Amino acid sequence: MNPKKLYELLKKRFGEAVISVDVENSIPPKYVIQPDKVHEISEFLKNTGDLEYDQLMCLTGQDLGNELSVVLNLFSTKHYSSITLEAKVAREHPELDSVSDLYATANWHEREAYDMLGVVFKGHPNMKRILLPDDWEGYPLRKDYKPADAWHGMPISKELSHKHN
Amino acid sequence: MSEAQRIITPRGHQDGIILAKLDEVLSLARSHSQWYLQFGLACCAIEMMATAASRYDLDRFGAMPRATPRQADLIFVSGTVTLKMAEKIKVLWEQMPAPKYAIAMGSCAISGGPYSRHGYSVLKGVDLIIPVDVYVPGCPPRPEALLEGLVLLAEKVKKEKLLSQKFSKKRGGAEK
Ligand code: SF4
């Protein structure tokens, strides 16, 4: 479906929850939406005939500075079309609904976004770290992240002078 | 004169009797039979697999891959040691029976490699947690380099006198 038309369709259905569409600077077109409506909008996109975005290609988190954002890349295997959804969440309170019940892909991708940026996905069946150890502190892909000196007695950021000299 | 001929002096070999120092025979045998624990961690592991496969044929040096630390004399730490994995390496190392050896393969295992400055989750060299015998530099090292590392280790093993020095209580030797 034509991106402008899809935008109008979404706007008509979800009103304020659909904030903008970017066609010029984004391939595929990017729809910015409210974080509390991510699940509903994805469900609509997945289950509506003519759209049928049945595959989640990727889900990523980003640190935009003032806020965090979550980006979903959806693809329709039937209509061979892809779109991007972006939901911005507050840095202090990064929470949104999980789409892992709609797309199985989301399970691990959401855990990665949680691991790296601390975005919490409500309703996720197993919301814990996926790559880093469970007792890791902090979220390394946040721009203000400072690594600790050591983890379980193993040095991390300390200058290893005996090695590098 | 080959190494074996130097160590083993045939005496009256018609009766099948040979005389040799047990220590030297043991070390000679060990140096030609270094069973290694399969332990691939990152891109370097691909080169280690290539070294073990038919073209470079690590087996001809007596190095056989083992799938359990209990049967291994040697561990190739081939690749990036993340902190999460470092704890497991330590456990595996402690499960290996002495005498045991470690080869750090690639820049990552030696010093953190490309992650040495900003890798928040990477251990900056496996020698921070286990003693390393041979360092094989490269990113990744070619199979020939790993072969050379193994041969260097064999040289080291050959010189060891386990019974008279390392494990003897009288001389205060402790296991490695
Ligand atoms: S040393 Fe290079 S090739 Fe080896 S694991 Fe590290 S990055 Fe990969």
Image (tube, coloured by chain):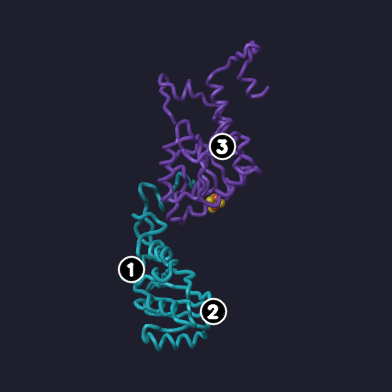
Chain colours: A cyan, B purple
Closest to the observer: A124 or B103? A124
Q: Which mark is residue B95?
A: none
Residue mark closest to the camera, 2 vs 3: 2
Q: Distance between the residues labelled 1 and 3?
A: 49 Å
Q: Single out the residue that lies furthest toward the left.
A: A93
Q: Are marks 2 and 1 on the same chain?
A: yes
Closest to the observer: B40 or B122? B40
Q: Is mark 3 on a helix, strand or loop?
A: loop
List the residue tagged with mark 3: B64
Residue pictured at 40% horizontal, 83% vertical: A18
Quadrant of residue B172 in the image? Answer: top left
List the residue tagged with mark 2: A79
The C terminus of chain B is located in which quarter?
Answer: top left
Q: Mark 2 lies on which chain?
A: A
Residue pictured at 62% horizontal, 16% vertical: B9
Q: Identity of the amino acid at label 1?
A: Gly
**Percent x, y for residue B171?**
42, 20
Q: Do labels 1 and 3 share a chain?
A: no
Q: Mark 1 lies on which chain?
A: A
Quadrant of residue B98 in the image? Answer: top left
**Percent x, y for residue A73?**
48, 73
Residue mark closest to the camera, 2 vs 1: 2
Q: Which mark is residue A123?
A: 1
